[in-house]
Amino acid sequence: MTHSEMRDYVYARLPLRKHLLPRERVDELVDQAIRNWPSEVLAQCRGDDDDFAQVMHANIGSLRRRIRANDYGFVWTIILSALASAVIELLLKWWLERRANRVLMLVWRQEAMK
């Protein structure tokens, strides 16, 4: 799977409210989630739902802060925050599916940081 295919994967699985935003903005949310993906911290989790929930809650908060920093209006901030949460949830499920996905995420994250 390529980075572009991941964007398509996430977009296809998002709820209908994704249509309130241009596709490019949704792709930016995916890119932000990948750039800020806490692979190292998640790898340290014991594997129970509480550990993953705590790490992902912090990651969602980070994305929400970045969204607010872009000075969108109140309604758009709510929509973007909800979509950011959905994006992270989809990426986490994908990341947990297999080890190869975790390696891909690391590669994409490193490429995004260049």
Image (cartoon, rainbow, N blue to C red):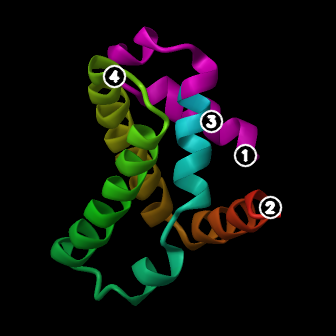
Prevailing secondary structure class for the magenta stretch in the rendered image: helix
Q: Marks 4/2: CA distance?
A: 28 Å
Disc with the residue nearer the chain's start (2 vs 3):
3
Task: Name which residue lies at 68% across and 63% down.
Answer: 109
In front: label 1 or label 2: 2
Residue at disc 2, secondary structure: helix
Query: As drawn, which residue projects farthest toward the top?
Result: 20
User: Contact, CB < 8 Å: mark 1 with mark 2?
Assistant: yes
Residue receiving disc 3:
7
User: Contact, CB < 8 Å: mark 4 with mark 1?
Assistant: no
Residue at disc 4, secondary structure: loop
Disc with the residue nearer the chain's start (4 vs 1):
1
Q: Residue 102: image x %, image y %?
A: 58, 69
Residue receiving disc 1:
3
User: Contact, CB < 8 Å: mark 3 with mark 1?
Assistant: yes
Q: Marks 1/2: CA distance?
A: 10 Å
Disc with the residue nearer the chain's start (1 vs 2):
1
Q: Is residue 30 magenta?
A: no
Residue receiving disc 2:
111
Quadrant position of residue 80: top left
Q: Residue 44: image x %, image y %?
A: 40, 89
Q: Residue 64: image x %, image y %?
A: 36, 46
Disc with the residue nearer the chain's start (4 vs 3):
3
Please provide the residue range marked out in magenta.
1-25
